[in-house]
Amino acid sequence: MAGRRILLDCGMMQGRRDLEARNADPFPFEPAALDALVLSHAHIDHVGRVPLLVARGFRGPIWLQRASADLLPVMLEDAASLAESEAERANRHRDPEQPPQLPLFTREDVAQVIPLLRPLDYDVRTTILPGVEITLRDAGHILGSSIVELWGSEGGATRKLVFSGDLGLKGTPILRDPAVVEDADLVLMESTYGDRNHRDRMATVAELGGVFEHAWRERGNVLIPAFAVGRSQELLYSFARHWEEWNLGRWRIFLDSPMAGRVVGIYDRHHELFDEQAQAVWAQRPSPFRLPNLHVTADRQQSMGINAIESGAIIIAGSGMANGGRILHHLRHRLGRRDTHVVFAGYQAEGTLGRRLGRGCAVGADPRPRPSGQCADPHHRRVVCAYRPARPDRVVRPFPRRAAAGAGPWRGPRPRGTGRGDRPALGCPGHLARPDMRCVV
Ligand SMILES: [Zn+2]
């Protein structure tokens, strides 16, 4: 644009293992030849390879919304420590003949990114390069998420490019509705949910309240895999709004994600970006992030300590697609119990455990998938998907044969400790049946 090279977002591929392996591939351009990077928001699929870009030679400014600039280090440090521990685990089981596996990037690489950040406020037109101007507009997706308007002037003519980033739904909790952009010469638009009709939000809320009531009557527990940024905060916000109605004071609520805990602090600092309703809720007591029975677990030991709780716990833990993180040990510990309820509160990508669980696939010793609506196990477990799987009709083999393994990253579960770099296996001995599974939204 205007003779300058500007990169829009630099995300990490997530989900299938073959896709994730491509994150280490060379960029299809020379990083050092870029003049600037613009980031739409801080989700890892939009920013996850920024440290790699810098490590490979990019030295230009990184323009992003102010709240995104606060979120970015948290996201990248978490991704770096995940990459470091995955490499460490893989190297423990490495054939000595093979070269050691290196993490995609390290926390030192992340530290190199921070001085390049150039935070912007919404709706302020700023010159970022000679002949190039930018305005960030609220995209209503997560805190700091932006629609990027870019103007390039060359030879007396100005052309405008609009990059939507991920767009929030109107009425997304906490956040303002996406801004309306009136004009553009070229639009680049995300389309994750472009082919789907979302269910009415009120119905979702009612259903969630029903799950809590049902679980309480059974003296059970509720597990919610949730992304540390966005969904975890939305859940806490919903808890505060429906505190009385859902009788949440009787539960012990755990936010079992140190990253989500840090992000809660960043949301708190930027409440000027919230919509009117959320600002009013924030003024109430308890405010969403100060629920009297909310415990934010600091370390792994505290996280494991939750396993001792027999009943009455709502546990929000990452990762949102159950393909890593602390939710795995909670699932492993509790999925075999009839009174465990699992609520999927977000998109479940192909190849993730969340997608397979949401489809009602068995996980454990007997992998035979059960037809929808039937339960082969007397231990009913309830699964509520907050988003409809893209292809709910397709049954996924939970244990892909070797020949089929290329179709997905999940090469297991194998007995623990025998697979190199495999995701941890779940120890549930039964089937995840879905006699009452409903997909909402
Ligand atoms: Zn996003």
Image (spheres, rainbow, N blue to C red):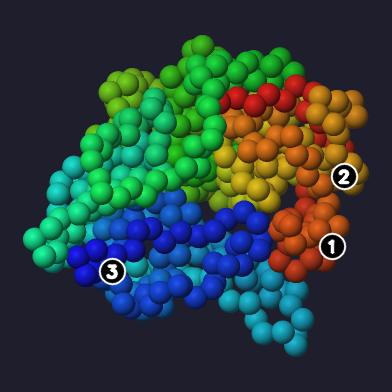
User: In this rendering, is residue 321 above or below 216?
Assistant: below
Residue 172 shows up from this direction: yes
Where is residue 48 drawn, in percent x and y? 46, 60
Amino acid type, label 3: Arg
Residue at disc 3, secondary structure: loop
Q: Amino acid at mark 1?
A: Ala
Q: Which residue is mark 2?
A: 367
Q: Is residue 383 left or right of residue 201?
A: right
- Disc on the earlier residue, 2 or 3: 3
- The mark found on residue 403 in the picture is 1
Q: Residue furthest bottom?
A: 97
| Residue 401 shown left or right of residue 174 in the figure | right
Q: Disc 3 marks which residue?
A: 5
**Quadrant location of the N terminus in the rendered image:** bottom left
Direction from residue 12 to residue 420 in the image, left or right: right
Question: Label 3, label 1: how many angstroms apart (C-alpha)?
Answer: 43 Å
User: Which mark is first along the chain, 1 or 3?
Assistant: 3
